[in-house]
Image (cartoon, grey):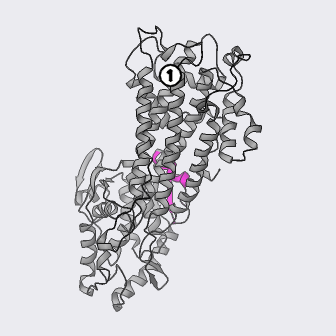
Amino acid sequence: MSNTLQLTGHDLTLRDLAMFEAQRPRVELAAAGRSQMQASLAAVEKVAATGLVRYGINTGFGAFARTRIEPGKLIELQYNLVRSHSVGVGEPFAPDIVRRIMLLKANSLAVGCSGIRPEVVDTLLALLNADVVPVIPSRGSVGASGDLAPLAHLALVLIGEGEAVHDGRVLHGAEVLTAAGREPVTLQAKEGLALLNGTQASAALAIGGLLRAETLLAASIAIGALTVEALAGSYTPFDARIHEVRRMPGQIAVAEQFRSLLTGSEIWESHRDCGRVQDPYSVRCMPQVLGAARDTFAHAADKLALEIDSVSDNPLIFGTDVLSGGNFHAEPIAMLADFMAIATAEIGGISERRSDLLVRQVNPNLTMFVTVEPGLESGFMIAQVAAAALASENKTLAHPASVDSISTSAGQEDHVSMATWAGIKLNQLAGNVARILAIEWLTASAAIDAQRPLKTTPALERLHALARRHVPPHKGDRRLDRDIAALADVIERGELTALLPQYRSLLDGNS
């Protein structure tokens, strides 16, 4: 990504969004986007001037869609919309989610189907570039008719009536825009509605979940391979011939990664002629389970790449036509978030099972619970219990939100997606999985230590050394919560991905 990101509405990518937080380039409305937006204003101005009845321009909203608003009150209509829809509750979204919402909203408006002035997007981007982060409560959207409540709080900031955080300080009202060197926006016809209508909060959450899920998938492969060695497991289940006849692309790709990590080791040589024929499923079937997760994330990546450059406003402007539809319905995003939540939960679920195997003395060279003095110490007994607790919690979080609906707006909005909640719980679930994987990594690293002086493969020795840079060797019982947190942070930062040779990211459309 260059130092400046130009928004046209047509070429923002998942890779751009993945790199945005790390690189924080300046964002500008491209000339093409500015021209597209300017062209759509003519239709709105015509409706406002001639009195043609068009939803959201000179009518009420939702159940008031048939109520015509007189020309002298069209501006008041937009301000009333923003203020009345600012009903968000709960903890605010994290700053990275808010920045992503702002970027997605600006890019969608740049397409030029919303009848909003370029100056409004300029103000939004000025806030983003100055790192003035609006305070957007996380609860209050049902993911249909747009993410109305969250986006209303974003719009509230633009008109000088909201709150934002800048340099660690909460700003209020006009001082928010002053921090970005801008004046409050004076809304024109349809502009309040254009800012509120859209699926950007749902999409930002789903994209955040995808980015985290891919990181967790890579970590699960690396840590799972370390567990194979810790358990003195077989390499045979990763043979390419097994996976080629199943034909699943994710399974084939994951098995290839396992083969790149399990290249032969002193540990492997030490049990070459052991009598164990097959390992339990949580070890033997990792390519099948993690491969299915990879295919799920690939599907989500393909669809979210489309969503990034889409328009989810209503009504939409095409030339001189103003058309009412339902692009604000976030069902496609809700289903993707739910599907990813199921796959991510399975990454955690199978990891917890491997942690259980590690403490069961499946490998006769280990002690029960990987203790130094069995009986006197508990070792990793309760670490596995913590993993089990998180895995069980994820079963509830993985229940799909998109199968739920509740009628709103006096029945006018009678089917909703719950996409925002689907995205929120996806991210909660991902945080749990990072900790489940951290527990497996912690336990497997201790199991490798217990088999010294034998070494594992070169790649897995690097993984073991990475763990040891953050947590000391296990030489007896100690509190493990800080160790788990430290390794979970390493996992979430994506440091394990670099340990996978030739890892192919899903963000570039690979499957």
The spot of residue 488 in percent (x, y) is 45, 32
Within 10 Å of disc 1 (Cα), the crowding (few <14, some 14-19, many 20+) is: many
Q: On screen, 460 above or below 399? A: above
In the current view of this chain or complex, which residue is farthest to the bottom? 50
Please state the horizontal and vertical placement of residue 106, each as a whole percent of the image.
43, 63
Q: Which residues are magenta?
A: 1-21
Residue 353 relative to residue 180: left or right: right
Where is residue 206 drawn, in percent x and y? Answer: 46, 53
Seen in the picture, residue 344 relative to 404 is either above or below; the reply is above
Q: Answer with the quarter of the image where residue 264 lies.
A: top right
Q: Amino acid at mark 1?
A: Thr
Q: Nearer the viewer, residue 256 or 41?
A: 256
Direction from residue 405 to residue 224 in the image, left or right: right
Which residue is at 48% across, 50% downward? 20
- Residue 303 higher or lower than 432, as above or below: below
Residue 18's x, y, as percent? 51, 49
Identified at 52% across, 70% down, the residue is 32
Q: Nearer the viewer, residue 386 or 226?
A: 386
Q: Which residue is mark 1?
A: 443
**Residue 2 magenta:** yes
460 magenta-colored = no
- In the image, is residue 434 above or below residue 82? above
Snapshot quadrant of residue 163: bottom left
Q: Nearer the viewer, residue 362 or 419?
A: 362
- Residue at the location (44% across, 49% down)? 399
Numbered disc 1: secondary structure: helix
Q: Can residue 360 be seen from the camera position used here?
A: yes
